Amino acid sequence: MAKSNKPIVWGPFAAGGTLTAFLTPVLILLTLLAALGHAPDLLAYDRMHAFASHWLVKLAIVGVVFLSLWSAAHRLRITCYDLGVRADTLVATIVYAIAVAASVAAAAYLLLI
Amino acid sequence: MAEQMSRKPYVRAIGREWLTRHPRYLRYLLRELSCLFIGGWTLMMVWGLARLAQGPEAWAAFLEALRSPASVVLQVLALAFTVYHGVTWFNLTPKALPLQLGEGFVAERAIAGAHYAVWGLLSLLVLFLAGAF
């Protein structure tokens, strides 16, 4: 039987797409408010540090980061193909590697908090 | 071992001329380009985690960097693109999750509408919990 790794690649993409549809707009709104000088209370150092200190929050942040980056990476890969870039294996390797590396980095930074 | 077969499959070259053939192709590309903003903003937040781990001064510097004009423009664009991603995603939910009830199917507008309602409530909840009001 033919084996395919498509479900493994596509599953996190669909999960990430749903997550970024529900959650990312309001998260960007939070940083945009901070950028416009109306920083939400949570972004104060003490609050944010305490928030990110809980192991469950750390786990949630790594999950959100990984799924967001993976779905973005997958879309970028497909878009490159649509725009005529035929080196799919190379593109896929680069974008997925960036997504995984940044997620690992996020986990490492969280362990320092 | 599909990769080691000796035949040479024909690979049709595809340029970019399809983009302008119909407005929906351009909208499709815009939707797909939302990934650059979602990915870019998420990488920015990973950088923020690094700064948070470094201490109060580094975190303050990160928040200050968020306020630069270029960053504000990027975040406004990112917000617009993620909202567009959300709208296209939720409009697809009736196709992805058709719900049968007895003999018939639940109306497409009800399925998409439920997603929009959850989206709105969740966003308000996050804003409230983060102390944005």
Image (cartoon, rainbow, N blue to C red):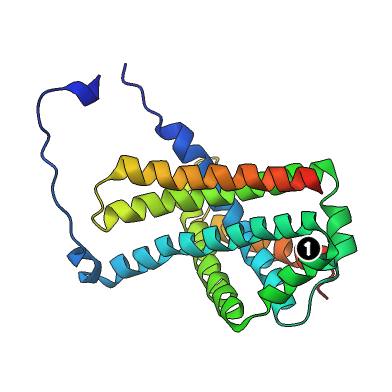
Quadrant of residue A21 within the rendered picture? bottom right
Q: Position of residue A68 (x, y in %)?
A: 57, 51
Q: Nearer the viewer, residue B88 or A11?
A: A11
Question: Few, some or many C-alpha atoms within 10 Å of disc 1 (few <14, some 14-19, many ≥20)?
Answer: few
Q: Left of A52 or right of it: where is B97?
A: left
Counting every numbered tag in the picture gives 1
Vertical comparison of B63 with A95: above or below: below
Visible residue check, residue B15: yes
Q: Quadrant of the N terminus of chain A?
A: top left
Mark 1 falls within which chain? B
Residue that carries the numbered disc 1 in the rendered image: B125
Visible residue check, residue B104: no
Q: Left of B7 or right of it: where is B88?
A: right
The local secondary structure at tag 1 comes to: helix
Instruction: Please give the name of the residue rendered at 70% of the width and 70% of the height, measured from the top-left corner.
Output: A31
Q: Position of residue A10 (x, y in %)?
A: 45, 40
Vertical comparison of B128 with A76: above or below: below
Quadrant of residue B45 within the rendered picture? bottom right
Vertical comparison of B78 with B95: above or below: below
Vertical comparison of A69 with A45: above or below: above
Q: Left of B91 or right of it: where is B47?
A: right
Q: Position of residue A74 (x, y in %)?
A: 43, 48
Instruction: Please give the name of the residue rendered at 61% of the width and 45% of the height, measured from the top-left corner.
Output: A103
Amino acid, disc 1: Leu
